[in-house]
Amino acid sequence: MRSQLRRARTTPLFRQNPWQPVSDFPPLLEVSHLSKHFGGVHALTSVSLRAVAGRVLALVGENGAGKSTIVKCLTGIHAPSSGSIRVDGVPHVFSGPQDAALVGISAIQQEPSMFDDLTVAENIFVGAQPQGRFGMVDWRAMTSAASGILDRIGSDIDPYATMKSLSVAERHIVSLAQALSADARLIIFDEPTAALSQSEIQHLYTIIEQLRDAGKAIVYISHKFDEIFRICDDYVVLRDGMPAGEGRIAEVGKDDLIAMMVGRTLTEIYPKTAAEIGDVVLKVSGYSHPTEFDDVSFHVRKGEILGFYGLIGAGRTEVMEAIFGLKGRSGGRLSLDGKPIDIASPAAAMKAGLAYVPEDRQHHGAILPFSILANISLPQLDRIGHGIFLNARAETALVEAFAERVHIRASSWHQPVAELSGGNQQKVVIGKWLATRPRVIILDEPTKGIDVGSKAAVHETIGQLVHDGLSVILVSSELEEALGICDRLMVMSEGRVVAELERAAFSSEAVLAAASRGNT
Amino acid sequence: MKAMTPNREAVLSLIIVAIVVIVIVRAPEFLIASNISNILSGWGFLAILVMGQLCVLVTRGIDLSQASVLAFTGMFLALLSQSMPGLPAAAFLVLATLMGLCLGLVNGALVSIVGIPPIIATLGTMTIIRGLIFVLSDGAWISSHEMSDAFKAFPAGAFIGVPQVFWVALVVIAVFWVLLNYRRIGRDIYAFGSNPHAARNAGVPRIRIELLVYALSGAAAGLCGYLWAGRFAIAYTQAAEGREFAIIAACVIGGISITGGRGSVLGAALGALFIAIVESALPYLRISPFLQTAVIGAVILFAVAANARSERRPGRQILPRHKQTTGEVK
Amino acid sequence: MKIRALGLWEVALFFLLAGVIVLNAWLSPYFLDVYNLIDSTFSFSEKALIALPMALLIIAREIDVSVASIVALCAVLMGVAADAGASVPVLALLSLCVGTAAGAFNGLIVNALGVHSIVVTIGTLSLYRGIAVSIVRDGSYTGFPGGFSWFGQHYLWGYVPVEFLIYVIATLIFGVLLHTTNHGRRIYAIGTNPDAARYSGVPVTRYRVALFALTGFMCGLAAVLLASRLSSVRLDIATGWELQVITMVVLGGVAIAGGAGTILGVTLAVFLIGLLTFGLSLVNVPGIVMNIYIGCMLIAAITLQRGATFVRLHLLSSNKET
């Protein structure tokens, strides 16, 4: 296979400003007291930051701390509720992403949203295609300009290739090329390494350093400390949408950053409750799919929390969906309590005693306009109804029993789930599945994007579940979470299980090394 | 990957050639001059309409009102030629296009500004415009002797033995080819259809794009309206009723994705050729002309199925590709 | 759910309906005649029967634009069977079976291809109509047995048309089905968020086929009533019905994006359109011109829906800000 990212050249490729030391640039971007509310939810409260040309600013915070919201305000997707954004000292109000691009602000999204049907060159120059005579789009000039930019960042992606044939790493590169073609001066990287392999990450660091040396201001969003200490110069920490600290990376330690991020120490958020581990309940052997996963085998025991760790796109969700009957497979068997069963639909999985809390809460987990009541009763209307007719009393009883258990905060069981906070929405989804009285519950990134309080509540619920004798499969991309609460950890990479670790052998180095092993 | 999926236009061309060969073998009279002339003009009408529909489909929309716009414009201009016999053909051409454009803009406004789903909006205007033809004409037929000579001369005429409709279609195709491939707004249409959300972030003006594509679709239908009324020397309320489905069939056969973002001018033109040839071949193969509607329906289903098959992917490509290929070698 | 059953939209429709009655009574002295009003139900009962399952389909985010073609196909095949000497129950059964099969075929294709139902049913619209046309050609079928006219021409107890009674019963059944059963709840769930419904164990594909088949079944029923009433079947039978049926549903407040709508709203819209067209026909407005009014009503209804959503979002956000 051809290397997707050619190694970058060693000579600096961007012109430096020779008569001005980089660190003395005035702040290119100055954000002061920025706030953003969505209805009653305060996503950002009075956040200030400065990005200086030639420096890399780390924007640090947990999931749901408001990092993405700030990016959306900076790139004109959201209008801030209050506060100001100054570029070169001039205040700006962006009415759309175009305005932000015009003053030189570009963002590389975690999963870049591109035009899959168009070519790479067109994606780079969308809306600004080079024009020749009579205002005709000059395809040749566009393609050679695209090659030029891609070349400068050391990539050999074919500018004629259709976007949809590209890998995630290549999409990031094209997204970056797009920013460079628009003469971006401030480039925001939103957790760019989440789906990249080690070598791709190294290449990205090289590119960022080159951009920095060329006098671009970089905002680097991450919650991975090795990255932050590797390439960032300054930091701003956010917690629950509020500023929680700022300064120079050289003057701060990892523990200080963690303390600022979470406001407490790690062991406190991941309390490991001891549960009695019993016999094997679910055994999966040789699950395979033509393109998504291959020969996945594992088992989970009564009272056990089995973790699945891997990079984003490692195939973990796909495996879980196959187990729950949501997608087909090309091979593999499954047994419950030693008895082989065939699960062809979610209804069958539910009947067998499985439950699956999907990763995408808003699209797959809950029906947002439905009430809490209707959401929780949906999987088992047949069981609680009077024949084919709805049974309001049984529904309420069901919800009362299980909503209490997961501590949903709502004004009434008739309240639409859309009106709840992310954390409470997640509790509704978990409650919905607990109400089916499963034996094995699969939780796919259950704490993604919810606030710290809800997160702790979810972890507490998980502890309670295994205590009650359930088996939990926890898919998590957060290493601390996986290491913190699991009894055993399966590591996946490129659709295969690459490591299985007992709790005694847990170490972040071993897991990370395994997770990016397959990717070369 | 590219080498594995053969070029769609090439495949379609081969299929068309195969059909023509089969028909000729079974009925050599298919090749007589008058029939070829009919096929060329039939293709011309369809191709012009399909160009407009192509733009709409690329933006994930659909325009069901084209046939009504065609009939309305034809009727209006036929009545105009009756009251103003002095008007030259060029005036009719311009007026027809403008009139179609305006009607198309109404669709565009309903879709882009009001936000009505395209199928519903154009289903509505399809019926309304059809009704307006009745109001305009009082249900009467305008036939040859009631139209001015200038009105009929150009559409019914021929240039080096080939119907004028064919030449007009070539010009229209050229215009759309340049527009869609070499103008920024044309590329914006594709970008918008490929990913409306990202297009918005890239500053592609949604409302302007949607207004434009429905206006183009209407303009194409309007132009056809004049050519149709002039060539067949008749204008009536039910003219071209049901043709909207032939247009859509031509588009899906030509590889235009109903889900937006994809479709080429060449593919659309070939799709129109396919339909024109199949329709004209039916009588030669002694297949009842009454089956024409059913054939078009089957063609739509078949083409949609073929497109869906080629578009469907087995899933995300997570497993590394090279490992699979080594597996095959063993 | 209960709050939604009598929303603003239904109240607005009720007043519109009252307005249409008053206007019609003022325009034509024949309008408020009991016999005339009873007979007016003939003009919409059959379409309204199809509007019921169509409402369920649209609530579930699907649509079937081939309904008129299914009616035509059923009617033509009944004509063929009648010529072959089939009895009345056989004719009715045939129509129901053909309709159900045609509808189920739509649903199966939508599932198999994973394409939006608009595209598929545009194809089957042509296909079914084409088959019907190629059978009947430019002739007509008139050889229905004597008892067949009972469905479409008979009055019960001297006043109530059989057609209308069938429609009323069907409305009650659909209302109960949508608003008080597990199936109804699941249909709303599918229409609101098909993915989440599937993840919650709702067999979405099975519901889809069932709803299309149900629509086909009701088309078959409507075909029986229509053929019986006209006692003649020609190639243009039921043309343009798809638009009128969809208009009834959308005007009834069913959200075209799925997930919302009530049978009460659809019923009010059915009577609104039915009485409006009846009133117009009393003042001698031809059918094709009536279609202009119906088309305008459809567009106006959705525009209002969009406007209402816009205003609600606007008011809601301003409430939250203060």
Image (cartoon, helix red, strand yellow):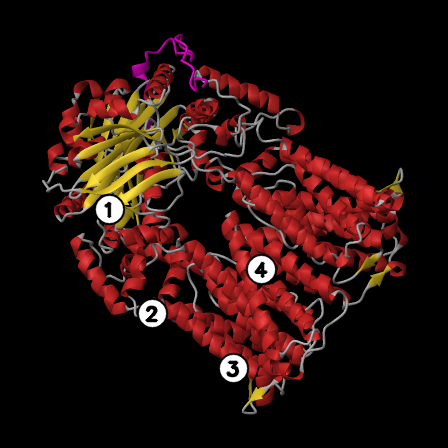
Magenta run includes residue A18: yes
Q: Disc 3 or 4, which lies upstream in sequence?
A: 4
In the image, residue A299 lies at what x, y percent?
24, 38
Horizontal side, residue B290 vs residue B153: left or right: left
Q: Are marks 3 and 4 in contact (CB under 8 Å)?
A: no
Dot 1 crowding, Cα within 10 Å, few <14, some 14–19, many 20+: many
Q: Position of residue C19 (x, y in %)?
A: 52, 78
Residue pointed to by mark 3 = C165
| The C terminus of chain A sits in image quarter | top left
Query: Predominant secondary structure in magenta?
Result: loop
- Residue occupying image coordinates x 46% and y 66%: C253
* Amino acid type of the residue tagged 4 in the rendering: Val
- Discs 3 and 2 carry the same chain letter: no
Residue occupying image coordinates x 27% and y 44%: A335
Residue B301 appearing in the image: yes
Residue A242 in view here: no
Q: Between label 3 and label 2, give the one nearer the viewer.
A: 2
Q: Is residue C249 left or right of residue A204?
A: right
Q: Secondary structure at mark 4?
A: loop
Q: From which residue to which does the magenta span run?
A: A1-29
